[in-house]
């Protein structure tokens, strides 16, 4: 579990770092003017499908069926089911794309628009087919995950960022000298990036034995079951993204200046959540689906509980560090140019209030997928819908007096309720779940996290008092010195208290270090 999630985490970390580089390249290329606004608004629509499906809605509906076919009917029926869903995807996405492009074309000829709106519609017409590619990439990723491959599929997003960066550097200059002409290259680059995600995974999938074949999707039971589960699955798995979108919409209505500073906090939260939380959840779905297909529910419960323990161990430390070091982290990464001291303070407040919900945000992903593995998409959908309403109520209550901090508190509280309801429903579904064992470990881990947070705060106070942060090296030290010392304290305490997750993580690190040392030794001999 740790090796697979760690492999995905490494790929996700690389992808997130390249995503940051991509945004820097984009900013240097087109700034924040009207042309940049047109491109980003146009990209937002197909990119929404990437964010929702990338979090696993399509695969959450399909993988349990895929694994059941593998266990009960063999590889031939498994690949046949995959082809049926892919053929249905081709027809559905193709029809939607044709209608969208036709509608945009009619709108362009029939209406009168500003230059920015006209450019946005033209760019959207070029980029809309990206949604088919991202759906197909999500299917391929889910199939490979179900076959036990995690690193290569997760690297698909890295390929996306690489292609989009290269588009700016190599392709844009060939489209003309004006920014309005060159921006069209970025739209073409989005399509190329989507194609790269698909083709990057194809050789490994073919090696596993998959061959594309036409299977009539209409009236196919597998396709019907996937469609039935996919819509509620989108709401259940993408609860975090929907929560963020909802609260930011409310905040924009109250005061548009709140949105930008809160968005900084969300981006920083998505790093640990994506690197480990989503990686672990992606590993667990096919594993749990396979156990559910075999009716091995004792192992199902044990695997899920172990995943929750690993997630708790990693995320409590990350949350503690984000709370204490919120201001230094924001200052190091963003405080320059138009992002001044006040902006840092506002974003840090939002991050410190959002970080306590990190564990809850990640647990929702794991617990929702456990329901999908049991072929139950209705329960997490209903719970998520209730918590979305609750989140809006909390936001309306807190955003006016506390602004960015109020948004963070609202999301943290609603996510905590989401986890509690999912655990309650799962316990009723599985009869015995073993929550007491997980809670016993969680209490020990929480105690260690609180002590580590105290150590980080003392170290930070000492650094700021004696060294300050008036240069880039000192800002680096202000973040990483307290972080490293607090992490060492955390690992020492959890190891001393007998937390199994700490031993497993440390053993995996030692194994990787030994492997690296042996490989370097072999290379030096050669």
Image (cartoon, rainbow, N blue to C red):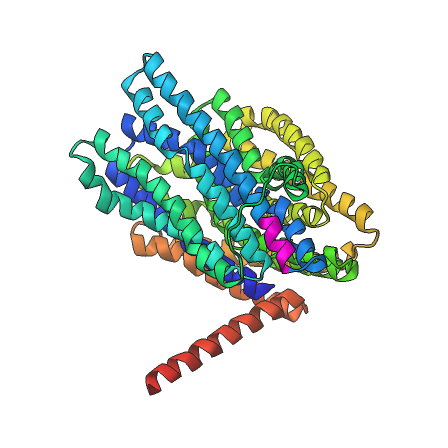
Q: Position of residue 150 (x, y in %)?
A: 52, 59
Q: Which quadrant of the rendered structure holds the C terminus?
A: bottom left
Q: Main secondary structure of the magenta part?
A: helix
Q: Which of 41/336 is in front? A: 41
Indicate the quadrant where residue 288 lies. bottom right
The structure residue drawn at horizontal position 55% and vertical position 29%, both measured from the top left corner, is: 246
Q: Which residues are magenta?
A: 75-82
Q: Is residue 77 magenta?
A: yes
The structure residue drawn at horizontal position 36% and vertical position 32%, both measured from the top left corner, is: 40
Q: Which of 407/472 is in front? A: 407
Q: Position of residue 185 (x, y in %)?
A: 27, 38
Q: Is residue 366 magenta?
A: no
Q: Is residue 264 above or below residue 36?
A: below
Indicate the quadrant where residue 294 lies. bottom right
Q: Is residue 311 left or right of residue 333?
A: right
Q: Which of 65/422 is in front? A: 65
Q: Which quadrant of the rendered structure holds the N terminus?
A: bottom right
Q: Is residue 107 left or right of residue 29?
A: right
Do we see residue 343 in this rendering?
Answer: yes
The structure residue drawn at horizontal position 59% and vertical position 54%, both measured from the top left corner, is: 79
Q: Give the residue furthest to the bottom.
A: 525
Q: Is residue 153 left or right of residue 492?
A: left
Q: Position of residue 210 (x, y in %)?
A: 53, 57
Q: Is residue 196 left or right of residue 82?
A: left
Q: Is residue 444 above or below residue 524?
A: above
Q: Position of residue 110 (x, y in %)?
A: 35, 12
């Amino acid at each position: 579990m740790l090796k697979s999630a760690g492999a995905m985490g490494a790929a996700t970390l690389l992808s997130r770092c390249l995503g940051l580089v991509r945004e820097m390249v984009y900013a240097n290329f087109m700034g924040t003017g009207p042309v940049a606004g047109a491109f980003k608004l146009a990209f937002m629509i197909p990119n929404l499908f990437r964010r929702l499906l990338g979090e696993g809605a399509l695969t959450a509906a399909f993988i349990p069926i895929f694994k059941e076919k593998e266990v009960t009917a063999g590889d031939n029926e498994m690949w046949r089911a995959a082809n049926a869903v892919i053929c249905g995807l081709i027809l559905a996405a193709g029809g939607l794309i044709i209608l969208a492009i036709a509608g945009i074309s009619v709108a362009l000829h029939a209406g009168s628009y500003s230059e920015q709106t006209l450019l946005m519609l033209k760019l959207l017409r070029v980029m809309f087919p990206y949604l088919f590619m991202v759906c197909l990439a999500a299917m391929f990723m889910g199939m490979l995950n179900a076959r036990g491959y995690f690193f290569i599929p997760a690297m698909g997003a890295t390929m996306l960022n690489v292609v989009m960066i290269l588009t700016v550097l190599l392709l844009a200059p060939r489209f003309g000298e004006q920014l309005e002409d060159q921006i069209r290259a970025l739209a073409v680059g989005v399509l190329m990036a989507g194609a790269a995600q698909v083709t990057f995974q194809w050789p490994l999938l073919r090696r596993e034995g998959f061959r594309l074949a036409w299977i009539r999707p209409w009236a196919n039971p597998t396709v019907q079951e996937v469609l039935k589960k996919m819509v509620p699955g989108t709401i259940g798995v993408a609860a975090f993204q929907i929560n963020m979108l909802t609260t930011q919409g409310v905040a924009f209505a109250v005061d548009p200046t709140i949105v930008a500073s809160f968005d900084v906090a969300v981006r920083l939260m998505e790093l640990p959540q994506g690197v480990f939380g989503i990686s672990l959840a992606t590993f667990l779905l096919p594993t749990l689906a396979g156990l559910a297909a075999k009716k091995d529910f004792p192992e199902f419960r044990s695997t899920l509980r172990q995943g929750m323990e690993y997630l708790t161990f990693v995320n409590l430390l990350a949350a503690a560090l984000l709370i204490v070091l919120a201001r230094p982290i924001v200052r190091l990464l963003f405080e320059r140019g138009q992002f001044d001291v006040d902006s840092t303070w506002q974003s840090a407040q939002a991050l410190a209030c959002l970080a306590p919900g990190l564990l809850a945000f990640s647990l929702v992903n794991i617990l929702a997928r456990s329901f999908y593995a049991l072929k139950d998409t209705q329960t997490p959908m209903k719970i998520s819908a209730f918590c979305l309403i609750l989140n809006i109520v909390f936001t309306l209550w807190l955003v006016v007096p506390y602004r960015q901090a109020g948004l963070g508190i609202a999301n943290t509280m609603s996510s905590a309720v989401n986890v509690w309801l999912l655990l309650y429903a799962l316990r009723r579904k599985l009869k015995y779940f073993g929550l007491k064992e997980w809670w016993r470990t969680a209490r020990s881990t929480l105690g260690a996290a609180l002590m580590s947070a105290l150590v980080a705060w003392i170290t930070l106070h000492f650094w700021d008092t004696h060294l300050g942060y008036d240069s880039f090296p000192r800002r680096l030290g202000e973040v990483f010195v307290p972080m490293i010392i607090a992490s060492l304290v955390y690992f020492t305490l959890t190891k001393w208290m007998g937390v199994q997750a700490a031993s497993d993580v440390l053993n995996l690190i030692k194994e990787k270090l030994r492997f690296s040392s042996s490989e370097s030794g072999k290379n030096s001999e050669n």
